[in-house]
Amino acid sequence: MEANFNDILVFATNIKTKADKEFISDILNQDTVIQQWTIDQEDIDCVLRIVSSILTANDIIKIINILGFNCKELE
């Protein structure tokens, strides 16, 4: 399925280490409304991209915050 541009949410996070990524991957991979996700840990903002036609930016921020990380939507 091809993602609609409006379904791509982009965030700055503090998910910096491989262990951090593995920790969140267990949660994000289990969420059936997340079609795809990536994190660019080489970017200074550790940019998290989520493809979902259902979740909002606030939903993602809450999920990431509950997991103990900072998360802020990027324009």
Image: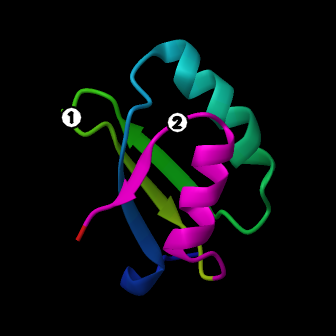
On the image, the x and y values in percent for residue 60 come to: 58, 61
Q: Is residue 57 above or below residue 73?
A: below
On the image, the x and y values in percent for residue 30 come to: 81, 48
Decide if residue 61 is on the left or right side of residue 14: right
Query: Badge 1: how crowded within 10 Å, few (<14), some, or many (20+)?
Result: few
Decide if residue 10 is on the left or right side of residue 67: left
Residue range in magenta is 54-74
* Residue 43 badge: 1
Nearer-N-terminus badge (1/2): 1
Residue 72 part of the magenta-drawn span: yes
What amino acid is found at the position of numbered circle 1 in the picture?
Asp
Q: Quadrant of residue 61?
A: bottom right
Residue 67 part of the magenta-drawn span: yes
Q: Is residue 72 above or below residue 15?
A: below
Residue at the spot of label 2? 69
Q: The C terminus lies in which quarter of the figure?
A: bottom left
What amino acid is found at the position of numbered circle 2 in the picture?
Phe
User: For this rendering, which residue is in front, 19 or 71?
Assistant: 71
Q: The N terminus lies in which quarter of the figure?
A: bottom right
Residue located at (55% from left, 22% from top): 20
Question: Alpha-carbon distance for marks 1 and 2?
Answer: 16 Å
Decide if residue 72 is on the left or right side of residue 45: right
Residue located at (66% from left, 81% from top): 54
